[in-house]
Amino acid sequence: MKKFTFHLITLVVCLSVNLQAQNTIEPPKGYSTQIGNMVAMLDDLKLRVTSSVENLKQHQVDFLLDDDANRIGAMILHLAATEKYYQVFTFENRSFSSKEEKEWLLPLELGETARKELVNKPISYYLDIWDTVRKETKKLLKTKDDNWFNAQVSNSSMNNHWAWYHVMEHQANHMGQIRLIIKRVTEN
């Protein structure tokens, strides 16, 4: 029995080491090294957020934790809006146009109006919008190199790398918030 237990423990340890060894950050083909690493991390976060929410029922998508909270669907749209903003900020060196503000400002800022308006849509609605924005982000990033990534954003104290790092950390923060809400809504 001791021999069996030893072999079982050894097998579990070896498998867990092998599984963890597969978790690497590598640039996808077609990207410069630093940009590709960022794309890999952005896509990993998006995949994890998507897997957390893709099977939610409507009451879960629209659940409010409290009167000042945001709905999960609205937060997904907020992630897309933030990413869209940084597209125009870093690739076009500008803020949203008035036309873009009409489309993106509500989910970018969230708040009371968003709580009232960003509701009653399936999670696929929000994820599809984020997919479209991400596809454009990746297309644009593929046209740039690491020199651009390290260059300052015009009229800003940040470089392009930091701007996209901010998009990534923003998604990670909201992933935690979304998972907390999912846990609370399924408990109630």
Image: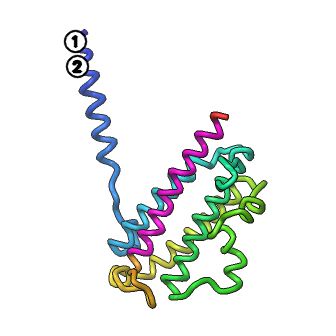
Residue positioned most to the bottom: 155
For the point 73% across and 53% down, the residue is 122
For the point 40% across and 67% down, the residue is 38
Q: What colour scheme governs how the chains and residues are painted in the rendered image of this protein? A: rainbow
Left or right of 106? Residue 172 is: left
Q: Position of residue 117 (x, y in %)?
A: 77, 62
Amino acid on which disc 2 is placed: Phe
Question: Considering depth in this image, is 39 or 184 the residue closer to the camera?
Answer: 184
For the point 24% across and 27% down, the residue is 10
Amino acid on which disc 1 is placed: Lys
Q: Position of residue 168 (x, y in %)?
A: 45, 64
Question: Considering depth in this image, is 12 or 53 the residue closer to the camera?
Answer: 53
Residue bearing mark 2: 6
Q: Position of residue 78 (x, y in %)?
A: 61, 65
Left or right of 152? Residue 171 is: right
- Magenta stretch holds residue 157: no
User: Tag 2, which secondary structure?
Assistant: helix
Looking at the image, is 75 positioned above or below residue 103?
Answer: above
- Magenta stretch holds residue 169: yes
Residue bearing mark 1: 2
The part of the chain drawn in magenta is: 162-186
Looking at the image, is 94 positioned above or below residue 4?
Answer: below
